Structures are given as structure tokens and as C-alpha cells.
Image (cartoon, rainbow, N blue to C red):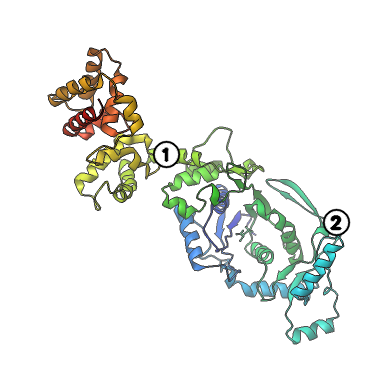
Amino acid sequence: MSGKVRVRFAPSPTGHLHVGGARTALFNWLFARNKGGTFILRIEDTDRERSTEESYRGIVDALRWLGLDWDEGPEVGGAWGPYFQSERRDGYRERAEMLTAGGKAYPCFCTAEELAERRQAMKSLGADPRYDRRCRDLEPGIVEELLSRGKPHVIRLKTSDEGVIEFTDIVHGKIAVPAEQIDDFIIVKSDGFPTYNFAAAVDDSRMEITHIIRGDDHLSNTPRQLLIYEALGARPPAFAHVPLIMGPDKARLSKRHGSTSIQQMRDEGYLPEAMVNYLALLGWSYDDSAQLFSMEELIEKFSLDRVSDKPAVFDYKKLRWMNGEYMKKRSVEDRVRLVMPHLEAAGLVKDPADGRMRDFVKRVVEVVGERLKMPQDIVELSDFFFRDEVEYDEKAAGKFLKRHYVGPAFRVLEDRLQTLHAYNEIGIEELMRGLAAEMGLKAGELIHPVRVALTGRAQSPGIFEVMALLGKEKVIERLARARRAYA
Ligand code: GLU
């Protein structure tokens, strides 16, 4: 062994890449990059019925979108391949045969019905249902005969009831499981395919994996995998089981809480750098307060000893905030590219937009500024720039337009805007503040009604910027319309 860190992400291609899987992949990737090690992608597709090419594609696309490149694995190759378990069957069979020949494993011919019956009987006696090792000591002659007759069988690992199986998990510390809790479990199924525990342990040892970083839900598999390493005469890797991800209600994160598939979240407009930053903080922290980390900072700062053993809470509100932070860092051109499809889908901009419209959208994006947390927010934040007529929010109109001074104030404002030479942000602001003072109003008492008249809402980007961008003609027209409708 080279002594270098080798870690793997080992998804089963039976569905989308979810938040939990992506977090596992990220922690492995960060650990490898931090240590100058190797990050391996291994596809665990031994469940032939549930594995699909489509899932595989989706997972690989999602990893690439997140920026998690692998040094060995599908499409890039490597000296420890192949990296699809379905192509490694000979290796599992050879090792199972080796273990059987060495007296560490044995064929078991018990049928599913027999096992079910015996389990039932054990239960009714109040005992833990477990395999009774019936086939463990069959006469070699009988075994040979049954095998030669082609009697269906599985292969089981011989385990002992003596002692404890112990290991130190990097996250959870010392873990000890009484050996008697583990029966002679199956390593090769009757269809000749390895079980998950066997395939994973064989591959992890053959691929010289040094650290296994995976979800807490696999903690209970580890003692079995350790027994397999032992039987194989292989040195076990280090283990780090990262905590479960929960929804805000403390139940395991699921669709009920919101989108959990990375592909879906990408389609919903989350930026990959925000996703990565957010996922990194699910169970890991640098200190008590730091939240925003670039990929480079994460690589530099990540360590397993700062992974918590407490469940992590997935907070969609915080993710949205974080997305906004990264949106701010994107160039205006980039933001235009991101919002354009949403403006088109909402029918606010013709598809495809011409050069003039693109320039206008660019100005809109600038005016909207930091309010844009997600690309689709653009519709809600700026539709009034694109519509011919404003739709009034009745509550806002009632509160701000139905005031005695609004009619006269708007009339004067319309006149003065008409003759304003410097029709720009500064000129408009000066005019508005001057007018408010003349009429004995606070600036806000004029600004709020103007905002509702121009945007239909009580909230909008800076009103002087909005007025400048909307243009003199539209502004005067909207003021007059609002005055006639409400004041
Ligand atoms: N294929 C397993 C899973 O997706 C991998 C578990 C492991 O990392 O050992 O859960």
C-alpha cells in the first residue's frame, strides 16, 4: 500500500442522487483533496432489478454539476477497475470460493420456507430469530452431493459467538458489538450475486481503500464487514460514519420536507457552489460561526475530526439565503443568463430576446440586485418592468394610495417629471425630496404611494432606480392611472 489516502463514494444506481448521498460524496472528496489522496467512484449495481442506466447517468451528472470529479471510476478508468460491481463478479466468486475452501465460509442449502419456519419458531420461544447454523457442519460428502445435484444454495460466513467486535469510528468513537449478535450471514446469494456487505468489503480491500466515509445508516453493517476483512486476511480501513440528515421537524429528511434530489434542486435554480457550501455544513463545521466557504477553503479546512455525531438539520431557508450570497458573486451577465428562461416562461420577455431586451434585462438585474436569491425570484421582483399595466396589490393600494394628499401630490409630480431635464436617479431623487418637503410630507409619505403606483406593491427595489429605468413616459402614465383609480 502506498500509504496515501484512498476513499470512495459507492452509490447504488437505483434512484436520484439525494442530499444525503451528495453530502457523503462531498465529504469523501474534500477529505481526499485535503490529503492529496485519491477519490474513487464505484458503482454498486449488484441489485440488477433496481439498478438502471438512467440512475447511473443522473448520479454522474449531479456529481459533475457539483464539481466533484473522481480520480478513478467510470469513464476515467484506473488501475483498480472495473468500477462497476456488476463487472467484478469473478472476483467475488473467487474470494467466496477461497473462504469456503479455507473453512471460513460454507454453502447453506436451507430454503427460504425452511428458514421462515424456523425463524417463526424461534420468535415464539421469545428468542432473537437468527440462522441456526444448520448447514455449517454438514458432512463434506453430503455437501458435494448436493452441489453436484445443483441444489440451490447461498454462501454464509462462519462467525463466532465468542467475544466482541470492536472498532473505533472517527466520528462516534469506540464501538463494541457482542459477537453473538451476528449470525452466520450470507455473503453470496442463491443467484450467485454477492450481498452488499460482501461486495463492499471485498472491493474496499481490493481497491486499497484507507478510509470509509459514509452515512450513519451503515454503522450496523460495519461489524459484518470487519468479519469479512478478517476472514479475507485483509487489514480493515478506518471508518467515519457521518450523521443523519433530518428535516426541521427532526424526522429523517424526505420529500415531505422539500426537494431532496440534487438534479431537482439544480433544476429549481440552486447554484452548485451554494449547494456544495451548504452540504459541507451538514454535520461538519469549521467553528461556531463561519458559514460561507469557497471550494478552496473547504478543501483547506475540511477534517473528519470536526464532523459531529449529532444529526444535522436541513434548513431550506438557510440554503436559500446561501444561494443569494452566491448569486451576488455571479457576474451580471451570468445572472441575466440565469433569469432569462424564467422571464420567458412567464411571458414577460419574448423568446428569444433581442439585443435591446437583453440590455434592458441586464439593467433590471442590476436594479433588483441582492434581492435576487433564486433565478426565478426575478418574476416576482421585476414583472412590473415588463408589463404594460401594473397589477395592484389591493392591500398596498388601500394603505398607500387612498390618502387625501396623493391626488394633488401625484399631479404636481407628473408635471415636474415632464419637464425634468436630468431624468436620472439623482435628478429624480432631488425632485421627489424637494416636492415632499414643499408639501410638508416626509419623504416616505410620497415614496410609498409612488412605489405602489409604479410597481403595484408595497416593496420593490430602490424607487429612484425603478423610476429611472422605467422611463419618464411610463412613470407619468402609471402615476396618473393610480391617481384616477384610487386617489
Ligand atoms: N451502495 C451503498 C449505498 O449506496 C454504499 C454504502 C457504503 O458506502 O458502503 O448505500
173 left or right, relative to 162 = left
Quadrant containing ligand 1 reads bottom right
345 left or right, relative to 117 = left
Q: Quadrant of residue 467?
A: top left
Q: Residues within 10 Å of mark 1 (few under 14, many from 20)?
A: many
Q: Where in the figure is residue 438, as x and y percent of width and height?
A: 22, 13
Q: Where in the figure is residue 212, as x and y percent of width and height?
A: 64, 54
265 left or right, relative to 121 = left
Q: Which residue is mark 1?
A: 324
Q: Residues within 10 Å of mark 2 (few under 14, many from 20)?
A: few
Looking at the image, which residue is at 24% across and 41% down?
387
Q: Is residue 441 visible?
A: yes
Residue nearer the viewer, 376 or 332: 376
Q: Quadrant of the C terminus?
A: top left
Looking at the image, which residue is at 22% across and 20% down?
409
Residue nearer the viewer, 48 or 290: 48
Q: Which mark is residue 154?
A: none
Whether label 1 touches label 2, CB < 8 Å:
no
Q: Where in the figure is residue 22, as x and y percent of width and height?
A: 54, 52
User: Is 182 placed above or below 487 here?
Assistant: below
Kind of residue at badge 1: Gly
Q: Disc 2 on helix, strand or loop?
A: loop
Q: Which residue is mark 2?
A: 163
Residue nearer the viewer, 238 or 53: 53
Kind of residue at badge 2: Gly
Q: Is residue 458 visible?
A: no
Q: Disc 1 on helix, strand or loop?
A: helix
Cα distance between the residues tagged 1 and 2: 54 Å
